[in-house]
Image: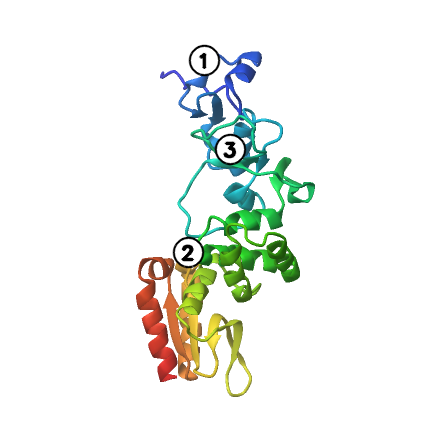
Amino acid sequence: MPTPPVPPRVTRPTDRRRARREGVSDWHLRHRGVVRMSRDTYLPRASVDDVRSRVAAVLLGAPASAVVSHLTAASLWGFEVPLVRNDPRVHLTVPPGVGIRHRADRRVHRAALADWQIARRAGFRVTSPGRTWLDLAASLPPAALLAATDQMLARRYPRVAFERLLEARRGARGVRTARRVLPVADRRAGSPMESVLRWFVHEAGLPAPDLQYVVRDAAGAFLGKVDMAWPEQRVLVEFDGDVHRERRVFVEDVRRQNGLVLTGWTVLRFTSADVLGRPERVLEVLRTALAAG
């Protein structure tokens, strides 16, 4: 009868000193169920994809002044940021002069943060939503920043608060990008990729769409709620995310599309492969449809 595998002794984020204190040897740290995140930080393999676990591990070797920031803070606040390379490193901001460097599991930024720019989230010190947005503005392309801004507006972050942030940071890196993005932001955006598509539409000089538009027939009967619509041209756009691959959703989409087409609407459907892989073609199709409407 085969010997059952030895379960890992590491069940939470740890470093070598803490592991030894808890009776975990170096041999246990080399277990295949344990991931070495950096020279002296370890995590159960099952927790590698959990941002809170990664943050907890990285903070074990960080100074007390470190604040979780940038993309990691955005993730902790629940904001999905598209168009950025998948980077498992934890972003930290520390005061200038603090002796801490980049590492395989962390990206270090230096800035003096005021008290109002620091909050607590999931038990960690994290940059506030407003400060996180300013940090993103300095590092993201406009389409990705628009997606983050839309999500913040959807959570009732006041538009006037964005304007105050920009006024207080006049001349700082990222402010110019943020000023371009803010007028386009809309809390009705249905998904981050819809926000990306809307930015491309804006940059192409096409008319701004109505978002989450309710379509009705001549008798006033409800036909559907669509992602984007240009009612005057009777053109609408649906963004098909992963959920639209489910059979039930797909069947409902087809039935709804038939009803819309029969009432004179031009229905355009795009996926992330279209928006990210060939945005020029997406805009060309949309421009043609609007011109014919």
Q: Are marks 3 and 2 in contact (CB under 8 Å)?
A: no
In three-dimensional space, the C-alpha distance between marks 1 and 2, rounded to whole angstroms, equals: 42 Å
Look at 47% across and 61% down and name the residue there.
Answer: 195
Q: Is residue 208 visible?
A: yes
Counting from the top left corner in percent of width and height, residue 200 is at 41, 65
Q: Which residue is mark 3?
A: 54
Circle 3: is it few (<14), some (14-19), or many (20+) Cα within 10 Å?
many
The one of 103 and 293 positioned closer to us in this rendering: 103
Amino acid at pointer 1:
Asp
Q: Are marks 1 and 2 in contact (CB under 8 Å)?
A: no
Give the mark, 3 or 2, whose residue is nearer the N terminus: 3
Q: Is residue 151 left or right of residue 270?
A: right
The one of 176 and 34 positioned closer to us in this rendering: 176
Q: Which residue is mark 2?
A: 242
Look at 44% across and 81% down and name the residue there.
Answer: 234
Q: Which mark is residue 26?
A: 1
Q: Tell me if residue 38 comes above or below residue 236 in the rendering.
A: above
Give the mark, 1 or 3, whose residue is nearer the N terminus: 1
Q: Is residue 78 visible?
A: no
Residue most extreme to the right: 115
Counting from the top left corner in percent of width and height, residue 235 is at 42, 78
In three-dimensional space, the C-alpha distance between marks 1 and 3, rounded to whole angstroms, equals: 20 Å
Asked which quadrant contains residue 250, the reply is bottom left
Amino acid at pointer 3:
Arg
Amino acid at pointer 2:
Asp
Circle 1: is it few (<14), some (14-19), or many (20+) Cα within 10 Å?
few
Circle 2: is it few (<14), some (14-19), or many (20+) Cα within 10 Å?
few
Counting from the top left corner in percent of width and height, residue 42 is at 48, 24
Q: Tell me if residue 222 comes above or below residue 68 in the rendering.
A: below
Say what secondary structure mark 2 lies in. helix
